[in-house]
Image (spheres, rainbow, N blue to C red):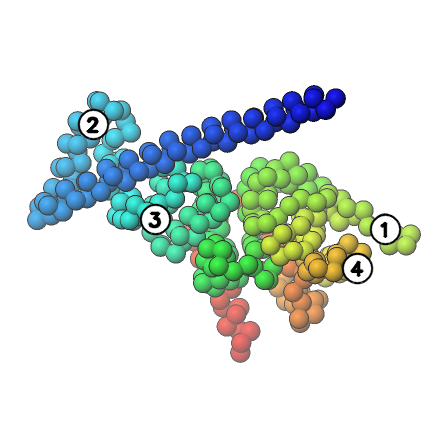
C-alpha cells in the first residue's frame, strides 16, 4: 500500500515539474519576443535620430524596412508593427525595466496608454495577479484605474499596486460602480435577484476579477438562523488583504433603508458568530442598480465603515460617462464641505 502511495506521490511531483518547466519555457519564448521587439525599436529610433533633419525620414525608413522584412518574416513586421516597436522603446528606454511575466500582446495594450501613472498601475497589477492579455484588456476597458480613483487618491492606489502598503479600508478595494458586463444580462431586461446571483456564480472567476485583490468565495445563500427565524445572505466572500468576511446582498432595483438594515444584521451576525479575534470586522456590500447617497448617509451611523452601497452596471463605461461620474462626485464632495 505504501509503495502505491509512493508511486502516486512521485507521479504528482513529476507532473508538477513538467508543467512548471513547460510554463517557464513558454514564458521564456514570450519574453524573448518582447526583447526582440525592444531591440528592433531601439535600432529604428537610433537610426531615425541620425536623419532627424528630414521630417519624412522616419516614414520612409519604416516603409522600406517593412517592405524588406515582410516577404521574409511575415506580417509580424509590417509598418504598423515597426511603429509599435519604436513606440515600445520610447516608452521603455531601459531594457532592465521590462517584466518577463508580460508578453508582447500585453505590452501592446500598455503602450497604448498615454498616462504614465495609469500605465504603471495596470503593468504592476498584471504582474502581481498574473492577468492574461484578455483580463488586462478587460480591466483597461472597464476603466478600473479611474473607478478606483473615484474613492481613493492616486498615491494610495499606486502604493497598493507596488505592494508598498496593504489596504486598510474597504474603499481602497471595493469599486463603485462595479462593471458586470461579462454576465450577459440585458440592460433593459426584467430579471430577478436570483437570476443575477446565478449569473455571478456562473461567471465567478470574472466576478472575482472585478471584485479586486484578495477575494475568495465562501458561500452562496448562506443560512443564518437567529432563534426561530431563518435568513439567507446572498453571497459571502473572504478578503485576505483586509482579513475579514465580506457579505454581499443583491438588489435589482433601487436601494432602500430596509435593505441596509438587513445587510447590517448579516454583518453583525458574522462579527459575533463567525469572526475570530484576530480578524477584522465584517464588511457588507449592497450591490444595487441605483442608490440615493443621502438615504445611505442618513440610514447608517456617521462613523460607518462596514456597510458599502455600490451600484452595478451591465455595460462597459465610456470615457465621457466616467468623466461625468467623477465631476458629479467632486461636486458632491465640495457641497459637503460647505
Residue plotted at (27% across, 48% down): 93
- Left or right: residue 49 versus residue 177 is left
Task: Evaluate whether residue 193 shows in this view.
Answer: no
Packing grade of label 3 (10 A; few <14, some 14-19, many >=20) is few
Residue 7 in sight in this render: yes
The picture places residue 13, in percent across and down from the top left corner, at 59, 29
Q: Earlier in the sequence, mark 4 or mark 2?
A: 2
Residue at 65% x, 56% y: name it: 243
Residues at circles 3 and 1 in contact by the CB criterion of under 8 Å: no
Separation of residues labelled 3 and 4 (CA atoms)? 48 Å
- Where does residue 141 sit, x and y in percent of width and height? 45, 45
Q: Which residue is mark 1?
A: 225
* Category of crowding for the residue at label 4, using alpha-carbon neighbours closer than 10 angstroms: few (below 14), some (14–19), many (at least 20): few
Mark sitting earlier along the chain (1/2): 2
Find the distance from the CA under tag 1 to the CA under tag 2.
Answer: 71 Å
Q: Which mark is residue 288?
A: none
Q: Give me the C-alpha separation between circle 4 and circle 2.
A: 68 Å
Q: Where residue 306 appears, x then y in whole percent?
A: 67, 62
- Residue drawn 49% across and 66% down? 330
The residue identified by callout 3 is 97
The residue singled out by tag 2 in the image is 69
For the residues marked 1 and 4, what is the alpha-carbon distance in whole angstroms? 13 Å
Amino acid at each position: 500500500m505504501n509503495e502505491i502511495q509512493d508511486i502516486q506521490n512521485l507521479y504528482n511531483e513529476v507532473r508538477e515539474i513538467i508543467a512548471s518547466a513547460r510554463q517557464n519555457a513558454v514564458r521564456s519564448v514570450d519574453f524573448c519576443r518582447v526583447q526582440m521587439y525592444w531591440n528592433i525599436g531601439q535600432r529604428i529610433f537610433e537610426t531615425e535620430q541620425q536623419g532627424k533633419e528630414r521630417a519624412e525620414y522616419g516614414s520612409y525608413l519604416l516603409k522600406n524596412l517593412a517592405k524588406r522584412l515582410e516577404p521574409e518574416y511575415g506580417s509580424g513586421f509590417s509598418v504598423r508593427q515597426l511603429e509599435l516597436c519604436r513606440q515600445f522603446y520610447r516608452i521603455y528606454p531601459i531594457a532592465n525595466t521590462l517584466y518577463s511575466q508580460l508578453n508582447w500582446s500585453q505590452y501592446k495594450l500598455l503602450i497604448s496608454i498615454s498616462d504614465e501613472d495609469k500605465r504603471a498601475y495596470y503593468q504592476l497589477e498584471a504582474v502581481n495577479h498574473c492577468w492574461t492579455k484578455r483580463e488586462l484588456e478587460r480591466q483597461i476597458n472597464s476603466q478600473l484605474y479611474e473607478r478606483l480613483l473615484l474613492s481613493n487618491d492616486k498615491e494610495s492606489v499606486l502604493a497598493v499596486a507596488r505592494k508598498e502598503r496593504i489596504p486598510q479600508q474597504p474603499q481602497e478595494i471595493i469599486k463603485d460602480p462595479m462593471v458586470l458586463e461579462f454576465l450577459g444580462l440585458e440592460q433593459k431586461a426584467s430579471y430577478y435577484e436570483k437570476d443575477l446571483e446565478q449569473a455571478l456564480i456562473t461567471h465567478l472567476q470574472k466576478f472575482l476579477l472585478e471584485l479586486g485583490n484578495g477575494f475568495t468565495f465562501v458561500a452562496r445563500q448562506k443560512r443564518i438562523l437567529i432563534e426561530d427565524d431563518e435568513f439567507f445572505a446572498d453571497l459571502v466572500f473572504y478578503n485576505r488583504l483586509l482579513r475579514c468576511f465580506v457579505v454581499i446582498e443583491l438588489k435589482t432595483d433601487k436601494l432602500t433603508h430596509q435593505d441596509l438594515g438587513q445587510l447590517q444584521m448579516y454583518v453583525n451576525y458574522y462579527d459575533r458568530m463567525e469572526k475570530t479575534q484576530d480578524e477584522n470586522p465584517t464588511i457588507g456590500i449592497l450591490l444595487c442598480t441605483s442608490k440615493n447617497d443621502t438615504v445611505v448617509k442618513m440610514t447608517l451611523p456617521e462613523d460607518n465603515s462596514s456597510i458599502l452601497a455600490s451600484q452595478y452596471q451591465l455595460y462597459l463605461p465610456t470615457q465621457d460617462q466616467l468623466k461625468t461620474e467623477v465631476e458629479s462626485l467632486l461636486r458632491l464632495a465640495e457641497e459637503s464641505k460647505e
